[in-house]
Image (cartoon, rainbow, N blue to C red):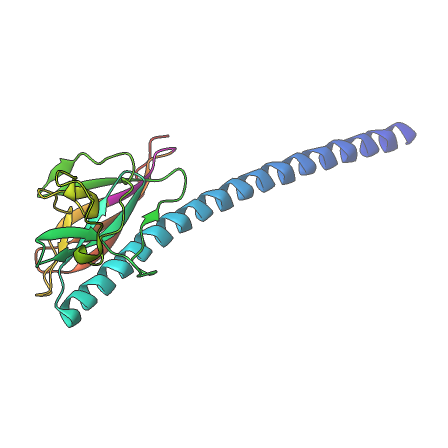
Amino acid sequence: MRPAGRASRGFTLIEVLVVLIIIVIISAVALLSLGFVGDERDLQTEVRRLSTLIELANDEASVLGRDYGLELAVSGYRFVEFDPLLNRWYEVIGDDILRPRKLEEGMEFDLFIEDRRILLEPKLATLPPPVADKDDEDDDQPADRDDDRDGLQNDYEPHVLIMSSGDVSPFELKIIRPADRAEMTLTMSLIGELEIQRDDNRIR
């Protein structure tokens, strides 16, 4: 009877080890799953923030009678405003909501307009603020100074136009996490509707 007892105790020990291994595996899978959920939430947060900002800029454009634009880079974006008197685009100044923003590390934009992929700059260029009053400039300022320092270049046009008429130019913007190619897509349709789509296709 004693050998049978020893065999029973040995089997119980193995059983405990197997259970512990199963618990470790399940815990590891759960932690990995939580990590992916967190990343998905980050993507959703970014795309919903941008969607809300575009809608806000659209409302301001309609109410204030101003034309806005959205300029995109691989790693961030900013809103610009058109000055009809100077016929120039300027970065929006003094508006904390429409300030330039960067994507979270590990994310990037991919822009399509009229089904054509747009090559984006790696990051937004640094711009000086516009001169408030030309009459306040020094008389000693050289005549051949570069006027483009006061705003964006004459031939500049933002990627997305947000007009005072309420129209927003159509686009398809993907926010991608290159590590596993997870992505969220923000689309502005021809009839002016913003739509957020989730793409679960990933390169494993």
Q: In this orientation, which residue lies closer to the viewer: 108 or 186?
A: 108
Q: In this orientation, which residue lies closer to the viewer: 85 or 9?
A: 85
- Residue lying farthest right? 2
In-image side of 3 versus 159 (left or right): right
Q: Tell me the residue at 34%/34% (across/down).
A: 178
Q: Tell me the residue at 36%/48% (across/down).
A: 43
Tell me the magenta residue range: 174-179
Find residue 176 and report its image quarter: top left
Find residue 31 and report its image quarter: top right
Magenta stretch: includes residue 175: yes
- Residue lying farthest bottom? 63
In-image side of 26 versus 56 (left or right): right
What is the quadrant of the N terminus in the image? top right
The image shows residue 7 at horizontal and vertical percentages of 82, 29
**166, above or below 153, in the image:** below
Q: Main secondary structure of the magenta part?
A: strand
Magenta stretch: includes residue 93: no
The image shows residue 108 at horizontal and vertical percentages of 31, 39
Q: In this orientation, which residue lies closer to the viewer: 33 or 170?
A: 170
Instruction: Tell me if I can see residue 184 in this picture.
Output: no
In-image side of 17 versus 97 (left or right): right
Q: Tell me the residue at 12%/68% (across/down).
A: 65
